Amino acid sequence: MAQTLDQAVKIAGYYPALATAVLRSAIGAETVRAHFVHAETTFDDREVRRHMTVLVITDTRLLRVHMDDGAGHTGDGRHEASATVETTALAAIRNTAMTHVVHEPERFSEGDLPSELVLAVGGSVHSRVDLEPASCGDESCEADHGYTGNLTSDDILVRVSLIADGEDSIRALQDFASVLQSAIGARG
């Protein structure tokens, strides 16, 4: 695993030994071309929860590792964490979209960083099927017309903000997106 990815995981501080083990297993013998590590803490009225998303580009794949905190199943207050690895072949990625959000755009000038960046990657391994009974439009018709529906891909989505995540995270996501866009564009 690339040393810089190892360092980024340690700096994020979210169960680095677990994250490193999961990443090494997922990456295998492939070379890391680019990575992005995003740790996030969320608060609600009763809990503080931590999440971490790691995106890795190899020569053939985009890996997304997502880790979450959780309460243990034993009921004794112990914590647990889950790590999910999602693998998408670079050849299966249909598109990427990078949204640049700029607060006070009238003050924006060349070289300024956006206030927020959102990277969406189409071609993830998860899809959702929404089905409903089909009809012919005749309200008195009682025939079975089967089903109609939509298949919707659940894209990979990563959002960073200048205020919450800092300049380094904005630049890191820009750099990662550039490598990803080149990798999928190189297919022709």
Image (cartoon, rainbow, N blue to C red):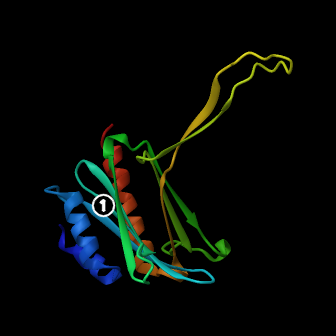
- Side (left or right) of 55 relative to 115: left
The relative height of residue 15 versus residue 28 in the rendered view (above or below) is below
Could you tell me residue 143's position as x and y percent?
74, 15
Q: Residue at x 49, y 51 (%)?
A: 155
Q: Residue at x 45, y 45 (%)?
A: 95
- Side (left or right) of 150 relative to 20: right
The relative height of residue 28 versus residue 92 in the rendered view (above or below) is below
Total marks shown come to: 1
Question: Is residue 51 visible to the viewer in this orientation of the structure?
Answer: no
Give the image quarter of residue 74: bottom left
Could you tell me residue 47's position as x and y percent?
55, 82
Give the image quarter of residue 77: bottom left
Q: Residue at x 24, y 79 (%)?
A: 7
Question: Is residue 68 visible to the viewer in this orientation of the structure?
Answer: yes
Could you tell me residue 101's position as x and y percent?
59, 67
Q: Nearer the viewer, residue 35 or 82?
A: 82
Q: Residue furthest left?
A: 29
Q: Residue at x 56, y 74 (%)?
A: 115
Q: Dot 1 corresponds to which residue?
A: 56
Image quarter of the N terminus = bottom left
Q: Nearer the viewer, residue 136 or 61?
A: 136
The relative height of residue 144 versus residue 72 in the rendered view (above or below) is above
At label 1, the amino acid type is Val
> In what element is the residue under mark 1?
strand
Give the image quarter of residue 173: bottom left
Could you tell me residue 87's position as x and y percent?
32, 51
| Label 1 crowd (10 A; few <14 / some 14-19 / many >=20) | many
